[in-house]
Image (cartoon, rainbow, N blue to C red):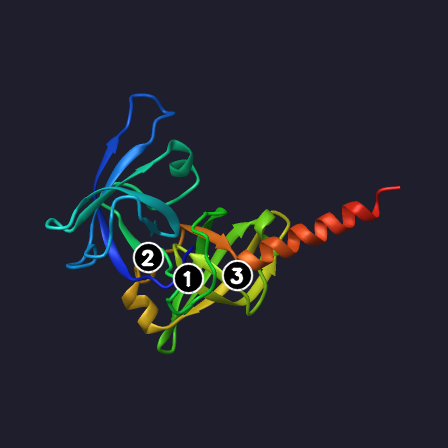
Amino acid sequence: MFTGIVTAIGHIVDAEPLGAQQTHGSRLTIETPAAYLDDVQPGDSIALNGACMTVTTLDTAARRFAVDISAESLARTSGLGERSVVNLEKALRLSDRLGGHLVSGHVDGIGTVTHFASVGESFELRVKAPSDLGRFIAPKGSITVNGVSLTVNRLSDARDSCEFSINLIPHTLHSTTLGALSVGQHVNLEIDLIARYVERMLGAAADSSSIV
């Protein structure tokens, strides 16, 4: 479990195929800031751009750790290629503050940046999400973009998509990789965990009411 509060920016310095077939995944090696891995052990969970991964090997002296990512995860996420820069978050401890919102680290879909421009001291970010995620997104609700917990300002539904708008303050731009986004770029999206369960419960209630 995570909170969507990025704790560091990492650099993917190597991506090694785990096999020759397309069904094989990759082993990613990530370089971190100094001392970031001091409290990390093999088997711990770290989110990369919002995708929960398991630390398989660790080299604290070199400030690097590795994760094995399946072909399925690679196909359903964005920004996890060699030489890319990624947002990092260690798994939540029960004693930690919940600064963002409850985040599972499971990417629900890929969004596309449609607008990214300054508004006063901040930036407005608009993202087009797949239509099947639209029912889980609400104004003033939470959504995770590339592992960052954010608040939806406005929402516009279309037949085949859903576009939402977010305001990014300077601190978020400087502390995460979101400041380097550009129009047309893909981002990882995770819908609000509570919205997911509410949708499931409402759907189950509707199904049961139709049973004769």
Can you tell which of label 3 and label 2 is closer to the viewer?
A: 2
Rendered view: 156 above or below 42: below
> Considering only order in the chain, which callout, 3 or 1, is on the residue closer to the N terminus?
1
Disc 3 residue type (three-letter): Phe
Instruction: Report the side of 88 relative to 31 (left or right).
Output: right
Disc 1 and disc 2 in contact, CB within 8 angstroms: yes
Decide which of 169, 57 is in the foreground and name it. 57
Vertical side of 14 occupied by 41: above or below:
below
Crowd around label 1: few <14 · some 14–19 · many ≥20 (10 Å): many
Q: Secondary structure at mark 3?
A: strand
* Three-letter amino acid code at the position of disc 1: Thr
Q: Residue at x 54, y 56 (%)?
A: 193
The residues bearing labels 3 and 2 have C-alpha atoms spaced at a distance of 24 Å
Identified at 37% across, 61% down, the residue is: 93
- Label 1 sits on residue: 3
Query: As drawn, is 180 to the left or to the right of 200?
Result: left
Residue farthest to the bottom, as pictured = 120
- Can you see residue 164? yes
Q: Earlier in the sequence, mark 1 or mark 2?
A: 1
Q: Which residue is mark 3?
A: 164
Image quadrant in which the C terminus is located:
top right
Residue 148, quarter of the rendered image = bottom left
Q: Amino acid at mark 2?
A: Glu
Q: Are marks 1 and 3 in contact (CB under 8 Å)?
A: no
Q: 25 or 116, which is in the foreground?
A: 25
Displayed quadrant of residue 19:
top left
* Local crowd size for mark 2, using a 10 Å CA cut-off: few (<14), some (14–19), many (≥20): many
Structural distance between the alpha carbons of marks 1 and 3? 20 Å
Q: CA distance from mark 1 to mark 2?
A: 8 Å
Name the mark on residue 78.
none
Residue wearing tag 2: 89
